[in-house]
Amino acid sequence: MTALYVLDVPENTTVAKVAGEDPEVTVGKVGPYFEITADGAIVVDRRATGCRHAVWYSCVAGVADGRIVQHDKDALRVDPA
Amino acid sequence: MTLEHKVRGVDHAAFPTFDPAGTVRFYRDVLGFPVVHSICAAGWGPEDHPDFIHFFFDIGNDDRIAFFYYFGLEPQHAHERGDVYAGFGPEVPEFFVRSRHLAIHVDDQDDLLEYRRRLDDSQWPVEMQIQHETIESIYTHDPNGYMVELTRAMRPVTPQEDLDANLTIDALLDVVGAPEPTFGKLLARKAELIVERAADWEAAQV
């Protein structure tokens, strides 16, 4: 299970929301962090989040059992390790 | 054990200048920072120290930026990039040259834009205005080449951001204490720390 952690602050809420639109992805909470989990890849479309670049490129707090294979102006993608 | 935190901000941050006239125009006449202190010192000591003027501007909150002007001292390097204290050759990447700077706080966007107007009406106009993660900043370079930022918070910092900052630093120390640190290793270590500590932290907040 791959997990992507995103801190729950106002700038980041759309990241968790957009990630959770994939039915294969589950969004929970661990303390003040969103815990975004999936058996497969987790993909977040940047434009759908509406995040400005400084927010987008600093929104990832942690990655467990996976690795970031894309984090650019288009998308964030975490693949299983 | 947490050590008692007794310090009270910046007393002064000091920089050399070869252009005291430009420096006074920039800080006092353009930005409106009052001159609050100066020392006229005769050179003395074993190193043939030049005579100098050490002068201070109020940057708010009783904090100060200070300069040294040394009579008769020539510039200490010939590089075009960097500032009068430190010069850099073409092999040094721009992000590194621009990394060291002083950021001065303002209360809100009205005040930020007021300083933007003052700079834009001068020979040192704003070079960039950027909304970062939670702050908005304007940047210029002073007559000495020092990068100066003025910044305002777009919202208050939340308690969970302090937790996150501490988890980041603990993860960073773990990663740089091992061979070949990378951003990916930091995010993996930080995920472990989030699982270990974040739920307990939140429970302790109530």
Image: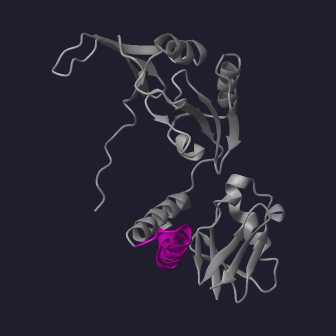
- Left or right position of B128 against B179: right
- Left or right position of B21 against A5: left
Q: Quadrant of residue B39?
A: top left
Main secondary-structure element of the magenta-colored stretch: helix
Q: Nearer the viewer, residue A17 or A69?
A: A69
- Left or right position of B180 against A67: left
Q: Nearer the viewer, residue B177 or B46?
A: B46
Write down the region rendered in magenta. Answer: B179-204
Q: Position of residue B136 (x, y in %)?
A: 66, 41
Q: Position of residue B27 (x, y in %)?
A: 53, 18
Q: Quadrant of residue A47?
A: bottom right
Is A51 contained in the magenta span? Answer: no
Q: Nearer the viewer, residue B118 or B180?
A: B180
Q: Judge whether B55 appears above or below B14 on screen.
A: above
Q: Judge whether A77 appears above or below A74 on screen.
A: below
Question: Residue sitting at 59 percent across and 33 percent down?
Answer: B150
Is B188 contained in the magenta span? Answer: yes
Q: Quadrant of residue B176?
A: bottom left
Q: Where is the N terminus of chain B found, in terms of image quarters? A: bottom left
Question: Residue sitting at 66 percent across and 30 percent down?
Answer: B112
- Left or right position of B130 against A65: right
Give the mark count.
0
Q: Position of residue B9 (x, y in %)?
A: 40, 37
Question: Residue sitting at 75 percent across and 53 percent down?
Answer: A52
